[in-house]
Amino acid sequence: MVAVTQTLLSVYGSRLVLPTSGVLMNNGINWFDTRPGSPNYLGPSKRPLTNMCPVIVTRNNGEGWFAIGASGGRKIMPAVTQVCSFLIDHGMNLEDAFHQPRIDASGGDALDCDCSHVEKLLARARARSGRRG
């Protein structure tokens, strides 16, 4: 079983194809921070932050169950985690798990919630965060 995560970022990535392999390179340099002194500032021998989360899940006997990844920058990890939970904790099939509404809290103080969540779930999330409205 294999899980692969690949991104080009913008259309056609860097528009550079490696001549010996034919691999199209991404333009991940835009992940660096241009503010001097920041943890992700561009410099020699530095690598940019990445948002990858390929996951392989096996059953108790070691047999492969599923492998997934996702696209979406900072939303990748919460998306993969929620799909895994739908499959493992709630016994959904893959299609149903992928089509469930999701919640994302990767943007700092904001909580993004799929509009198809029922008001009851939103009220519970607000109550736990101490927010109103």
Image (cartoon, rainbow, N blue to C red):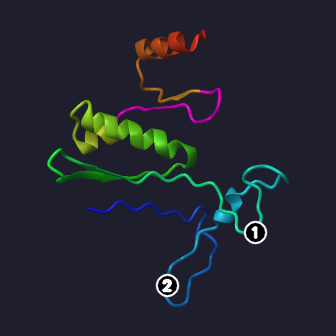
Q: Which residues are magenta?
A: 99-110
Q: Nearer the viewer, mark 1 or mark 2?
A: 1
**Is 60 rendered above or below residue 115?**
below
Location of residue 26 (image quadrant): bottom right
Q: Which residue is mark 1?
A: 44
In the rendered view, does 130 fall on the left or right side of 88? right
Residue 91 screen position, x and y as percent: 21, 34
Q: Callout 2, which amino acid?
A: Gly
In the rendered view, does 16 fall on the left or right side of 60? right
Location of residue 11 (image quadrant): bottom right
Residue at 35 percent of width and 39 percent of height: 83
**Is 111 rendered above or below residue 126?**
below
Q: Which residue is at the front of the view, 108 or 10?
A: 108
Q: Callout 1, which amino acid?
A: Pro
Residue 65 screen position, x and y as percent: 21, 50
Residue at 55 percent of width and 31 percent of height: 105
Residue 102 screen position, x and y as percent: 43, 32
Element at label 1: loop
The tag on residue 22 is 2
Residue located farthest toward the right when viewing the structure as drawn: 36
